[in-house]
Image (cartoon, grey):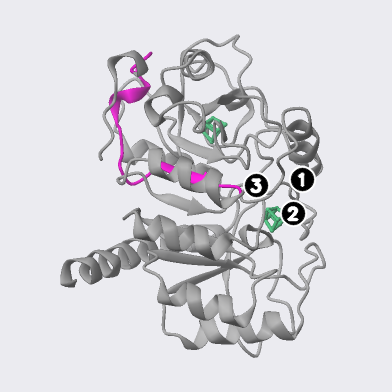
Amino acid sequence: MTTEYPAAARQGEIFLFPSKESRSIQVTTVIGCRNKCSYCPQDAIISSYAKRSRECVMNMDVFKKCADKIPADVPIHFSGFSEPWQNPACADMIAYACKTEHIVDVYTTLAGMMPRDAQRLLSLNIRRLFVHLPSDSGHEQINIDGDYISSLKIIRNSGFPVKYNLHLSEVHPKIKPIVKTAFYMELNTRAGNAQYNSKRSVRRKLGKLECAIDSCLMNYVLLPNGEVALCCMDFGLKHVIGSLLDSDYRSLFAGKEFKRVSEGMAEADSDILCRRCNFAYKKPLVNMGRLSKFYCKMRNIRSARGFAQQIQTFIFNKTSSLKYNQKNRLK
Ligand code: SF4
Ligand code: SF4
């Protein structure tokens, strides 16, 4: 099954550069992340989700029904608004997504992962693995116990191309003997949902906007109850664009809420999340696609370390995609 872009979804001009690489569905396996990183707006997602549903832990049936509706050329990311391994069915979900021939990326802190889960994860046909490490700043409440250390060692020694990252400072001293350095990730306000550098939002952006993450606005987040939010900035669930339990994938970008956002990108007075998002940028008169996205990402970088990280990310993405493609061609 491949994705078609229905004419109804080509509202405004945001569909000029549909990019297969940037489309994805991020799976939020549970609501409420125990890691409680100081820079993450967990309060926002917990309170806004409580108004919509009581299903805080995604069950396997819901996942299967939703995954079956996600086209195979839309990568599934296990990430979303919480640590995926807080859900005991997480590894089964990843296995199912791989079995249904989706491209699967995993973003984890390893919190909740047992050493046997780490072994199993490495045996699955995932494309990329990102590990968010605890820093020495105390901003994360990731429990560095024996299981954590064993899982990290298994992953570290596996030879799998893993990308280790962290925010704010240096790798936690308990981790340093295993992973000495990690990619430094810039923080942002999550479109006004999180406080960062004592600011809660960026100045409201005017004019015709475009999203630097995906100009097609197809970077959705699947919630435990099957509903789908606009993107990983939407911790306040301002734009829930549909439900994969109730309808199909195409209906997500053919519905009223998606239309409101896509049209709102062109209207300066629109009340949409993107107007306060670091990743929204003023659409240039001559849109040069990838170059303008790259420019926007660079503009958000505040340090030489951030710049180096962007370059490393680019190389990591290219090499892991190449390795994944090679592995699957050899099958
Ligand atoms: S681990 Fe990720 S989702 Fe959980 S609190 Fe930290 S930043 Fe948020
Ligand atoms: S809120 Fe930001 S990341 Fe999300 S769609 Fe809008 S511009 Fe893109």
The three-letter amino acid code for the residue at tag 3 is: Phe
Q: CA distance from mark 2 to mark 3?
A: 8 Å
Q: Which residues are magenta?
A: 10-28
Residue at numbered disc 3: 81
Residue sitting at x 43%, y 34%: 218
- Mark 1 and 3 residues: CB-CB less than 8 Å, in contact? yes
**Residue 251 coordinates in the image, percent (x, y):** 42, 22
- Report helix, strand or loop for mark 1: helix
Residue 196: quadrant of the picture: top right
Q: How many callouts does the rendering have?
A: 3
Residue 17: quadrant of the picture: top left
Residue at numbered disc 2: 33
Residue sitting at x 76%, y 31%: 48
Q: Please, is residue 146 above or below residue 198 in the view? A: below
The three-letter amino acid code for the residue at tag 1 is: Gln
The reply to whether the residue tagged 2 has its Cβ within 8 angstroms of ligand 1 is yes
Where, quadrant-wise, is the N terminus in this rendering? top left
The three-letter amino acid code for the residue at tag 2 is: Cys
Ligand 1, by image quadrant, is bottom right
Please identify the residue farthest to the left as the structure is shown: 330
Residue at numbered disc 1: 42
- Report helix, strand or loop for mark 2: loop
- Report helix, strand or loop for mark 3: loop
Where, quadrant-wise, is the C terminus in this rendering? bottom left
- Mark 2 and 3 residues: CB-CB less than 8 Å, in contact? yes
The reply to whether the residue tagged 1 has its Cβ within 8 angstroms of ligand 1 is yes
Please identify the residue farthest to the front as the structure is shown: 61
Q: Please, is residue 250 above or below residue 129 in the view? A: above
Front residue (pair 217, 224): 224
Label 2 or label 3, whichever comes before in sequence order: 2
